[in-house]
Amino acid sequence: QVQLVESGGGLVQPGGSLRLSCSASGSIFSFDHMGWYRQAPGKQRELVAVITSGGSTSYADASSVRDRFTISRDNAKNTVYLQMHSPKPEDTAVYYCNAARGSARYWGQGTQVTVSS
């Protein structure tokens, strides 16, 4: 049974920084790729960033995420991170960790991020 547990969410001021963590119950080497998604109230869940087992990264183009967020992984800790720099109020959402292995998809329970002064 794969378990993904997100942490690090909370209230952050615009222009601040926040780091989200996603800890997996087993080796993250077993996943083809892992990523972060987010869902704002009244909106569909959307991709934020993805990192492959080889360390390649890709980011959503919306809202300049590429320029402000960084996805990374620590294989020794079985953890994937999302470093958020200069968050904006429109980044407010529940952030979900996702892992893919073949056709299987796994999700964490989500962590709330609120960007407000």
Image (tube, grey):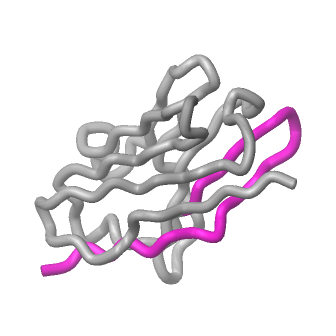
Depth order, front residue of 29/94? 29
Query: What residue sits 33% from the left and 54% below the top?
Result: 19
Query: What residue sits 42% from the left and 38% below the top?
Result: 71
Q: Position of residue 110 (x, y in %)?
A: 57, 69
Per the rendered image, the range of residues in magenta is 96-117
Q: Outermost residue toward the front?
A: 76
Above/below status of 23 relative to 44 = above
Above/below status of 83 relative to 111 = above
- Dominant secondary structure, magenta: strand
Any magenta on residue 111?
yes
Any magenta on residue 84?
no
Quadrant position of the N terminus in the picture: bottom right
> How many numbered marks does the figure carry?
0
Q: Outermost residue toward the top?
A: 54
Above/below status of 24 relative to 3 = above
Indicate the quadrant where residue 72 lies. top left
Quadrant position of the C terminus in the picture: bottom left
Depth order, front residue of 7/71? 7
Left or right: where 33 falls relative to 85: right
Depth order, front residue of 19/14? 19
Q: Position of residue 31 (x, y in %)?
A: 73, 33
Q: Position of residue 21 (x, y in %)?
A: 47, 53
Q: Position of residue 25 (x, y in %)?
A: 72, 50
Query: What residue sits 51% from the left and 21% below the top?
Result: 56
Query: What residue sits 14% from the left and 60% below the top?
Result: 16
